[in-house]
Image (cartoon, grey):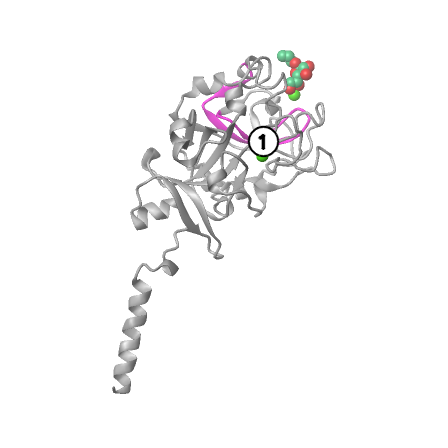
Amino acid sequence: MANWLVLLVACVSINLSLSSKEPEYFSPRSCKELMERYEIEEDGLYYLTSPTGVKYQTYCDMTTAGGGWTLVASVHENNLYGKCTTGDRWSSQQGGSPNVPDGDGSWSNTVTFGNAEAATSDDFKNPGYYDITAENVAVWHVPNNERVGRWKLTSFLRYHTESKFLRSYGGNLYNLFKIFPVKNNAGSCPANHGPSVPVVYDAGDASFNHNLFGPHVRARTDPGFIMFRAINYEKAAMAICLGVKPKDCNTEHSCIGGSGYFPEGSPRQCGDFTGLDWSGYGTHVGWSASKQLIEAAVLIFYR
Ligand code: 3S6
Ligand code: CA
Ligand code: CA
């Protein structure tokens, strides 16, 4: 064969292999990309790839409000009686102490843990949490230990933002919490709360959501919002308020995740589900949330 012909054949075959959908080149970065570029329409577990080459499996919600939602994290409370002990990855596993003001730092670092299939049985955080550039957040409350195929069915609350607020905060929660650190003494209440964003409900509604909290909490919160980086009276920081916007600074009864030190009654408010049990475990009186709320994982999605 003539040299020029060999070259031509080689070029054509390189081109062919590049354009074909071989696994090497099938590397969606988010569920939104998977939906839009690869026309995937079903809810379920898929593989995504981060730009640094980390391949990970996560859940995609391809149907809610147009679909394309990527599960990036779950906050699971394995033991509400343990106060900043093992399993409190979204607050501190190092005990409540002023010496660890930002606890494990999970809201604003690149440490990942858990896996998608166990997202209702353990904490989960994947590279999408810091890698994906998104506009909105969705939250699902799914009973602990549910299998993936039943998450949507058994979730008793699902809500999402529509304002594209993440555009103003770096496109994801990793960047938002760089601006608003989940750290003890990082600010005061209410001056230094992070953004509160209205939500639209896909399961349950604002009044059902509100009623999952005890009466003291209901009287001091407005339903129908997600609020980020709450600060309480004692200057502890929390990451996410669950479908409510606090009106006072006892934010530790409706907001979860947090700094490594909660001065009030220390360490009683320290942990992934903070002070959701302040008036007893699952009692649904005073400051305590219902059992339904505290025995469910909080799944966080981006789109
Ligand atoms: C409805 C009563 C107000 O109770 C106070 O708030 C009480 O003194 C404290 O124990 C309590 C906590 O700060 C609640 O977070
Ligand atoms: Ca946990
Ligand atoms: Ca308080």
Q: Local crowd at mark 1 within 10 Å, few (<14), some, or many (≥20)?
A: many
Residue 271 is a magenta residue: no
Toward the bottom, the furthest residue is: 2
Quadrant for ligand 1? top right
Location of the N terminus (image quadrant): bottom left
Residue pictured at 49% horizontal, 34% vertical: 120
Residue sitting nearer the eye, 41 or 179: 41
Over which residues does the magenta segment extend? 219-243
User: Please, is residue 193 above or below residue 178 in the view?
Assistant: above
Image quadrant in which you'd find residue 69? top left
Is any part of residue 193 visible from this angle? no
Residue tagged by mark 1? 78
Residue 228 is a magenta residue: yes
Q: Position of residue 112 (x, y in %)?
A: 55, 46
Please state if 53 lies on the left or on the right of 4 as rendered: right
Q: Position of residue 275 (x, y in %)?
A: 62, 24
Main SS of the magenta part reads strand
